[in-house]
Amino acid sequence: MIRNYLKIAFRKLLKNKAHTAINIIGLAVAFGSSILLYLTASYEFSYDTFHKDADRVYRLYFNTVDKSGKQEYSAAMSYPLTPALKAEFPEVEAATRLMWLGGVIEYQGKKFEKNIRAVDAGFLKVFSFPLLKGNANTALAGKSSIVISKTTAENIFGKTDPVGKQISIDLGGRKEPFIVGGVLDNAPKNSTIEYDVLMLSENHSSYEALKSSWTNQNHEVYIKLAANTSQATAEKRFEPFINKYMKTTEEDAKKSGRMKNARGQYVSLLLMPFADVHFDTITNWGSGVSKNYIYTLLTIALLIVLIASINFINLTIAKSFTQAKEVGVRKSLGANKGQLFLQGWGESFLVCLVALIIGLGMAYAFLPQFNRLFESNLSIQNFLVPTNLIVAIIGFLIITFIAGGYPAFVSSRFNIVQVLKGKLTKKKPGVLRNSLLIVQFSISCLLISCTLVIFEQLKYLKNKPMGYDKEQIISVPVGNTLNRKTAVQQFRNELSKYPTIASVTGSGVNFGSGLDGSSSRSTYGFDYYPNESDTQNMKSILTDWVRVDYDFLKTLGIKTIEGRDFSPSFGTDSTALIVTESLVKQMGEKHAVDKFLMPDSAVGKQKIIGVIPDFYLYSLRRESRSITLEMAPQGRVNYVLIRTQSQNLAEAMDLVKTTWKKLVPNDEFKGSFINENVDRWYNREERLSQIFSLAASIAIMLSCMGLFAVALMIIEQRTKEIGVRKVLGASITSIVNLISIDFLKMVAVAFVIATPIAYYVMHKWIQDFAYRTDLQWWIFALAGVLLVIIALLTVSYQSIRAALMNPVKSLKSD
């Protein structure tokens, strides 16, 4: 019997080639694109889940509230915090600090630049990266012990066992010997934590000076709670801990006018579950991938499948009315509803199965382009994960059962008398078909509106003046091989002979997101005394801190409002400061030059020599702070900034690259233009815009395919009516309007439904940006106009074709 059903199904599908092709193409595109979007979301959610006790691992962070009531978060911790936690809280099973270190490994005359992380011995207990060689209890037993990754071991030692071998590492100008105590497996691609070399935190250059300071915070801390301890319990226990050790921080918060948070504290030490660290967008220490972004991908995938399913339902039901006599004959010969349902559902199942196979092929074929476009790391292995396979199979069965089962259920319930009399085929499909078409176009309108809003916000971010001239400036990461103390001067010496080079300077932070992928932010607190004898009126000031070299303002094109730039003519400039005008307002002064600030680092009071306009040092996603510039100690910077006057930017970049190769012949050049770096800040929004554009295009294409096919079916059903109207003198225009007007009404209803939803969704999304464009009415109006034009073009072809049909043939049709 099943064999017979399959034969009939194949024959019917082949007989109705156009109908079958539209269904298969629509479903295949929907399945293929949805699979890629789902795999992307699944991969993001898989981050850090491979650790054995990931549910017990947390990252520490602080919560404060500024004087305006705005929540602020920071994951930067102080050196003494970790040992104090381990000593006072038995529920903290293990803990580790985690920070970046710059260094070059030397072994047998060869140099290797690797990713070095400073940690505690507890790192191997908090995380479950497999230790391939060595003993977990002794691998990081001493200050001179290191653990290296599998790839690092192969690069340096080849096939030789590295455990026990001695290497030297240049840590910012000081070479130290280290013994390899163990080899860790490489961190998976879906790991938030990456490493090539692990060494103890005591090796960090700032450790000795700051090991007892609770106010200097420069690294992350991860802890692993005991199995019987909850997050809420631990956070409650931390409250007296903060009062005990960070009293100074709380007092400073009171003085600066900060407010208490929801826990009734000025400063709270909280726990972020390890699974959420990859999605951290609040502390500036995360990847910047928001969970909302991932949920958006899943929503888009569902919407695309929904549109394709609606097409399938509409077309299958419409086709069933033209094949109603076949159902009537089968019923008259004894077929029951179950058999008719099984036959109809079987045809739908075959269509969906073929579409799924084609969709999988399309997903695989477009995987490389998808990875490049959306900066993903998907492979065929991601789909073969058991969880993903189960979700795909269940999703396919649900879609097939609903999209294919409902039309089969409708056709199996046809009244045999009406069918054989030919009355059923004259009955209009009615509310269901129109409702489904409205849903389709509502989704399309929603996606078009979202695409336009994201595009406008992206344009706003990229075009907003940053407060400095970002054009024609090349940023070169110094790296670990080039001496940071002399890097700027070396570039000055080499480039001074070229008239196209206007100026060279240095900076402790990059402008935008450079090719080195590194980002950092230093925030410092100052005490300001308007009158040194009056300590009661002291003001606490929080500011972004940047260490720079001479000619910084000249290179960035920033003019002073008051005072002067740093100059080698003044020996005291090594401790002087240049501040932005917003910091002057925090001081409560009209003029700040020759005033003194007292940093938290207690290096002595520092004199302000210049005031400059505010500028945006970091992404516009968050509100900017005031900025303080200081001369880098001994000229030590992380980036060399070079302004070129050449109109040939490629030639200027080649000149800088040649200079780099002359100074550091064996290191990769990672220079980039600052304007490109700034644009890279918004790669996430760029990808979201591309995803919405792609999704909107697919949704529109599928909606148009469905509209085209439904219009064709309706015209077939109204062939005689059109012929009669033409005989009675109806014009082509009136017939086209007659057919098109119903569809345009549905598009109008879809616009009314989709617009408030799009406005609400985009209003919520745009709140994530401190600086944002307005949601203009014309954006949503434009989405509606585009939808009307697309629908009209889709329907008009069939309408005009029907209007031009010979009325004699129309009246002869059955």
Image: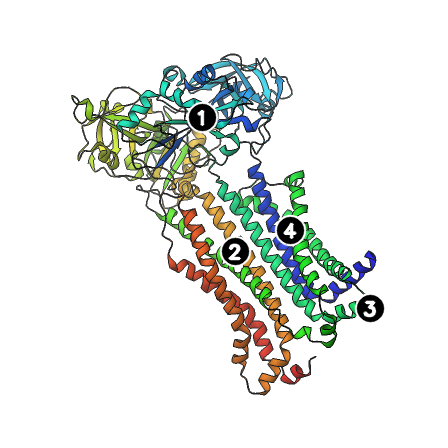
Q: Residue beneath label 1, please? A: 235
Q: Residues within 10 Å of mark 2 (few under 14, many from 20)?
A: many
Q: CB atoms at circles 2 and 3 under 8 Å apart? A: no
Q: Is residue 765 above or below residue 227?
A: below
Q: Looking at this view, is 575 or 322 the one in front? A: 322
Q: CB atoms at circles 4 and 2 under 8 Å apart? A: no
Marker disc for residue 696: 2
Residue occupying the point 33% across, 20% down: 247
Lower position in the chain sequence, tag 3 or tag 4: 3
Q: Closer to the camera: disc 3 or disc 4?
A: 3
Q: Closer to the camera: disc 2 or disc 3?
A: 3
Residue 204 shown left or right of residue 358 in the figure:
left
Q: CB atoms at circles 1 and 4 under 8 Å apart? A: no
Q: Residue beneath label 4, please? A: 362
Where is residue 372 drawn, in percent x and y? 55, 44
Q: Looking at this view, is 355 or 168 the one in front? A: 355
Lower position in the chain sequence, tag 1 or tag 4: 1
For numbered disc 4, what is the local secondary structure? helix
Q: Residues within 10 Å of mark 4 (few under 14, many from 20)?
A: some
Q: Is residue 643 above or below residue 150?
A: below
Residue 702 shown left or right of residue 326 in the figure:
left
**Res. 192 visible in picture:** no
Q: Is residue 158 above or below residue 670?
A: above
Lower position in the chain sequence, tag 1 or tag 2: 1
Q: Residue beneath label 3, please? A: 333
Quarter location, residue 164: top right
Where is residue 665 drawn, in percent x and y? 47, 28
Q: Residues within 10 Å of mark 1 (few under 14, many from 20)?
A: some
Amino acid type shown at disc 1: Glu
Residue occupying the point 61% across, 59% down: 310
